[in-house]
Image: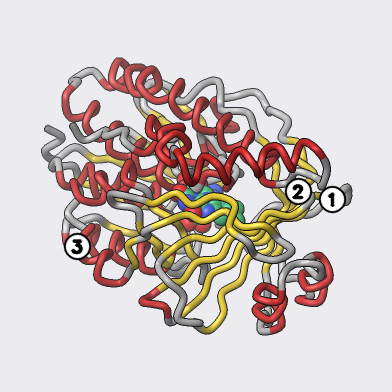
Amino acid sequence: MLIGRPISVIGGGIGGLAVALACAQRGAQVTVLEQAEAIAEVGAGIQISPNGWVVLEALGVAGALADRSMRSTAVRLRDFRRGAEVFTMALRGDFYLVHRADLIEVLRAACVSAGVTIRLGVQVTEITPDGRANRLALGDGSSETHGLTLAADGLNSAARRALNAKSRAFFTGQVAWRATLPGRDLPAEAHVFMGPGRHLVRYPLRGGALTNIVAVEERDQWAAEGWHHADDPENLRVAFTDFCPEIREMLDDVQAPKLWGLYRHPVARHWHAEALALLGDAAHPTLPFLAQGANLALEDAYVLSRILADEPDTATALARYQAARKTRTARVIEAANDNATNYHLRPGPLRFAAHSALRIASRVAPHVVANRYRWIHSHDVTR
Ligand SMILES: Cc1cc2nc3c(=O)[nH]c(=O)nc-3n(C[C@H](O)[C@H](O)[C@H](O)COP(=O)(O)OP(=O)(O)OC[C@H]3O[C@@H](n4cnc5c(N)ncnc54)[C@H](O)[C@@H]3O)c2cc1C
């Protein structure tokens, strides 16, 4: 157990709050340092699959989240031009369509109930590991010394920089627009409209009150990475102008989309020092093509807390944690990278053959494609 053990967590996103809660439930005295002035999330959807849901169940927050979310019953791959179905994968198990703000709120509330201290407006600008302690330089110019520190500070992690030589992320040549619109009474399913060099994912949120879209386009021009870059909705409409009327009409309602440049980052080589560990996007930023980044962060959080509770020597525990997580996360990320290519095939023999094969598989053996990802979704870190 971690009874009375002080633990600091950098970052109050999905990974940070989950690991804070998991450690607090095992008895640790946890403090979260979050740079934002409030624990909040962008207004967007997120798909949680059974491998992430088991963690939310183990943390005791799945019930509260299920009340605000929709259980997803299918993923439908559709052709962009007419919207015709190419492949349908029925989902069995705990696949949920979740509003990010709802996930963050249930985690935050559970953290507060478990006695976690959340310090807001605290930006960690630099970390210097020093044996069993870490010196944290803060944005206001002060510095503090913390013992065991778990860093879930996302894509531009200061902790990752402290543990690794700078690695080069490269622009994938793809950008993603994200927007939510008023609901359209859509069924609880994710629909993927596949076009040449582009695809659009659409699903409902909060009982159908909102519709979430993520629209991905291949392009040469560089675009910035991050949730906060606004774009003119006209650019989104122009990029998807040859999609079926169902999509075009929906895009007419988009008012303030955000544009995210998609980058590939290598999985960090070193995840830990003697008393410092990375988790979530800080260790392994994940492209959204298999909806796994947050699910992996939840898995990390649970595994890290359990190993810390089991293993009395912290440095050994952190090495065990890296060994337990690195291969799986790298494999999932590789699978996500591959998926973009499959969605974006150009008209021609390859696209015809691939879509025909999917149509036939959909009728004859839908389980074959579903089984392709079973190793991701059925992984249960809580067992
Ligand atoms: C378009 C898109 C769609 C996606 N859809 C899905 C999906 O459907 N399913 C899924 O599983 N994943 C999805 N993902 C991936 C998912 O969003 C991320 O993997 C996940 O948010 C990572 O969580 P995290 O806690 O590690 O990092 P983050 O969510 O980035 O949280 C980091 C936190 O740390 C704080 N912070 C950062 N730096 C500092 C600092 N220096 N000091 C103090 N605090 C700091 C930040 O303010 C933030 O609160 C998607 C990603 C994109 C781009």
**Residue 309 position within the rendered picture, expressed as x and y whole percent measured from the top left:** 18, 30
Q: For this view, does 305 lie left or right of residue 47?
A: left
Query: At 51% from the left edge and 26% from the top edge, which residue is drawn?
Result: 331
Kindly state the secondary structure of the residue where label 2 is placed.
Answer: strand
Crowdedness near tag 2: few (<14), some (14–19) or many (≥20) residues, C-alpha within 10 Å: many
Cα separation between marks 1 and 3: 41 Å
Q: Can you identify the residue that label 1 sits on?
A: 219
How many marks overall?
3
Q: For this view, does 4 lie left or right of residue 379?
A: left
Position above or below: 143 against 335? below
Kindly state the secondary structure of the residue where label 3 is placed.
Answer: helix
Residue 260: image quadrant is bottom right
Q: Can you identify the residue that label 3 sits on?
A: 63
Circles 2 and 1 in contact, beta carbons < 8 Å: yes
How has the structure been colored for display?
secondary structure
Q: Can you identify the residue that label 2 sits on?
A: 174
Query: At 17% from the left edge and 56% from the top edge, which residue is drawn?
Result: 114
**Residue 109 position within the rendered picture, expressed as x and y whole percent measured from the top left:** 25, 65
Cα separation between marks 2 and 1: 6 Å
Q: Amino acid at mark 3?
A: Gly
Near-viewer residue (184 or 26): 184
